[in-house]
Image: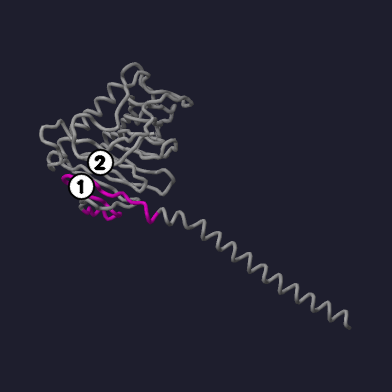
């Protein structure tokens, strides 16, 4: 009898211990799940683009209603919202890591179209210029997409021009390194270094530009955007009297400055210029931070 009674006590004790152990495991798993879930929630709550310059008609479309709210200095754009500029509209936005991007007239750009890591902008139509900020020697990967192109960068200064409803896209690099691929037709990846550019045709595989073609394209697009920027900022009275223009967001001192690197299939034009993160011509207001790798 004593043996049976002792066995029952032992069994009861074992069952209680097993229950406590199971509860402990459940608590640990719940805490781990909470920790895993916290970073995305934090990223969503802090993923904002703040308007640090604004001229003319600039608005944001916040949801499927297509209602446009005017953007002013200090206005915030959240992930998934679309920035729209009129024919007289221009704005510069800064994101949480210090990177900036310009949106030029007659453009439509969605900020962080998804919450994927590195997803920065989706350009539906129009022109933007991006200035990626990063710490020295530490890449800051970002992606910019268009209807036909995926532009992958590690930290650089570059321009994207979506020219029509079909998504014909020109990508030009001032600083750093950019990889471009055609989302519709495939083909090789084209790597661009400073002074180079390429155009993504929605109906043809992506081809690198040989000779001086990429350099001419990059310089032409840069000059056109510099001229538009100067007109817009002078209209607001930002320009300095007697100066040739106003500085764009600067590229920063840690840029690649066109250091050649290998490892990609396809190249842009081999004779690119050195490029610059901010346009020449002017001693305007100090530029907002940007950065190239």
Residue toward you, 152 or 52: 52
Residue toward you, 11 or 293: 293
The image shows residue 11, relative to residue 147, as above or below, that is below
Residue toward you, 126 or 246: 246
How far apart marks 1 and 2 lie (CA) works out to: 9 Å
- Does the magenta run of residues contain 50? yes
Q: How many marks?
A: 2
Percent x, y for residue 214?
A: 32, 22
Among numbered discs 1 and 2, the one appearing first in the sequence: 1
Given contact means CB atoms under 8 Å apart, are the residues at marks 1 and 2 in contact? yes
Which residue ends up furthest to the bottom in the rendered image? Answer: 1
Residue corresponding to mark 2: 103
Residue corresponding to mark 1: 58
In this rendering, position of residue 5 left or right of residue 101 = right
User: Which mark is on residue 163?
Assistant: none
In this rendering, position of residue 119 left or right of residue 67 = right
Image point (24%, 47%), residue name: 52
Q: Over which residues does the magenta segment extend?
A: 44-69
Percent x, y for residue 215?
A: 30, 21
Image point (28%, 50%), residue name: 50
Percent x, y for residue 256?
A: 39, 30
Tell me the colour scheme of the image: one colour
Image point (42%, 43%), residue name: 118
- SS class, disc 2: strand
- Does the magenta run of residues contain 293? no
């Amino acid at each position: 009898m004593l043996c049976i009674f002792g066995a029952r006590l032992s069994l009861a004790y074992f069952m209680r211990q097993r229950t406590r152990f199971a509860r402990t495991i459940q608590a640990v798993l719940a805490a781990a799940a909470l920790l895993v879930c916290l970073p995305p929630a934090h990223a969503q709550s802090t993923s904002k683009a703040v308007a640090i310059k604004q001229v003319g008609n600039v608005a944001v479309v916040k949801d499927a209603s297509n209602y446009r709210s005017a953007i002013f200095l200090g206005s915030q754009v959240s992930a998934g919202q679309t920035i729209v500029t009129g024919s007289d509209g221009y704005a510069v936005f800064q994101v949480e890591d210090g990177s900036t991007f310009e949106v030029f007239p007659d453009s439509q750009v969605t900020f962080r179209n998804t919450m994927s890591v590195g997803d920065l902008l989706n350009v539906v139509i129009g022109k933007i210029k991006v200035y990626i900020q990063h710490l020295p020697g530490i890449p800051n990967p970002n992606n910019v997409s268009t209807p036909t192109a995926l532009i992958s960068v590690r930290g650089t200064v570059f321009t994207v021009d979506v020219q029509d409803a079909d998504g014909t896209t020109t990508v030009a690099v001032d600083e750093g390194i950019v990889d471009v691929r055609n989302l519709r037709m495939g083909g090789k990846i084209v790597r661009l270094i400073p002074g180079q550019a390429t155009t993504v045709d929605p109906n043809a595989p992506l081809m690198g530009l040989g000779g001086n073609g990429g350099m001419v394209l990059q310089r032409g697009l840069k000059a056109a955007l510099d001229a538009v920027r100067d007109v817009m900022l002078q209209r607001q009275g930002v320009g300095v009297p007697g100066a040739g223009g106003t500085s764009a967001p600067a590229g920063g001192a840690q840029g690649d400055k066109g250091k050649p690197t290998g490892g990609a299939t396809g190249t842009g034009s081999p004779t690119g210029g050195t490029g610059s993160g901010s346009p020449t011509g002017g001693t305007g207001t100090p530029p907002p931070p940007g950065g190239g790798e």
